[in-house]
Amino acid sequence: MRILSCLFLLIITAFTASAQTTEDSVKKAVNHLFSAMQQSDSTALMQSFAPGAVLQTVTKDKQGVVAVRTEAISDFAGHISKLPKQAVDEKITFDVVKINGDLAIAWTPYKLYFKEQFVHCGVNSFQLVRLSEGWKIQYLIDTRTTTGCE
């Protein structure tokens, strides 16, 4: 009976782990980016992205004209590396994660804090690709606002 119980527990554990693995691994890849930002670790930040990845922000000027600003990931990493550790904290929630084979999306509303002071909020839209070394961010675009952030 004891062997049967152990075998049952092993099967349930293996099934549960495999059922969560893909979505959890996508979330882990996204969280790796924010952990690198908190640690001001430009190397880890760069490792979050796929080769040729794109980083963009939806902006709006004073007249309300919408534009998309592109930033080199290396420039972003360089900026983050100059910050004190734990100075930047982007608190995200996973609203949507969808996966099809080696392609995934993650939609993550967020609030950004700098030295524990609120800066802005918005939504990150991630496109990830599963490469030989794991999930990497291929495309990240975000929105930014200071209103409606409750």
Image: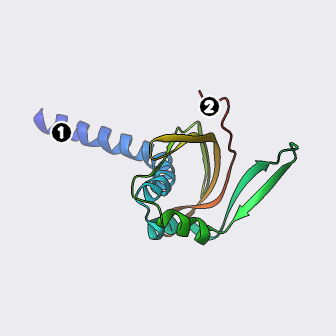
Q: At 88% from the left edge and 44% from the top edge, which residue is drawn?
A: 63
Q: Determine whether 13 is above or below 132 in the image.
A: above
Rendering coords of residue 48 (x, y %):
51, 63
Q: At 75% from the left edge and 50% from the top edge, which residue is drawn?
A: 58
Rendering coords of residue 13 (x, y %):
30, 41
Residue at the outermost top position: 150
Q: Nearer the viewer, residue 121 or 44?
A: 121
Instruction: Give the residue pinned by disc 2.
Output: 149
Query: SS class of the residue under badge 1?
Result: helix
Do callouts 2 and 1 mark residues in contact (Cβ within 8 Å)? no
Q: Quick one: label 2, few (<14), some, or many (20+) residues within 10 Å?
A: few
Tag 2: amino acid: Cys
Looking at the rendered image, the quarter that the N terminus falls into is: top left
Residue at the outermost left position: 2
Asked whether residue 131 is in view, the answer is: no
Q: At 51% from the left edge and 62% from the top edge, which residue is drawn?
A: 80
Q: Determine whether 60 is above or below 128 in the image.
A: above
Asked whether residue 146 is in view, the answer is: yes
Tag 1: amino acid: Cys
Q: At 44% from the left edge and 59% from the top edge, which residue is drawn?
A: 36
Q: Determine whether 132 is above or below 126 in the image.
A: below
Residue 8 in which image quadrant:
top left
Residue 64 marker: none
Instruction: Give the residue pinned by disc 1.
Output: 6
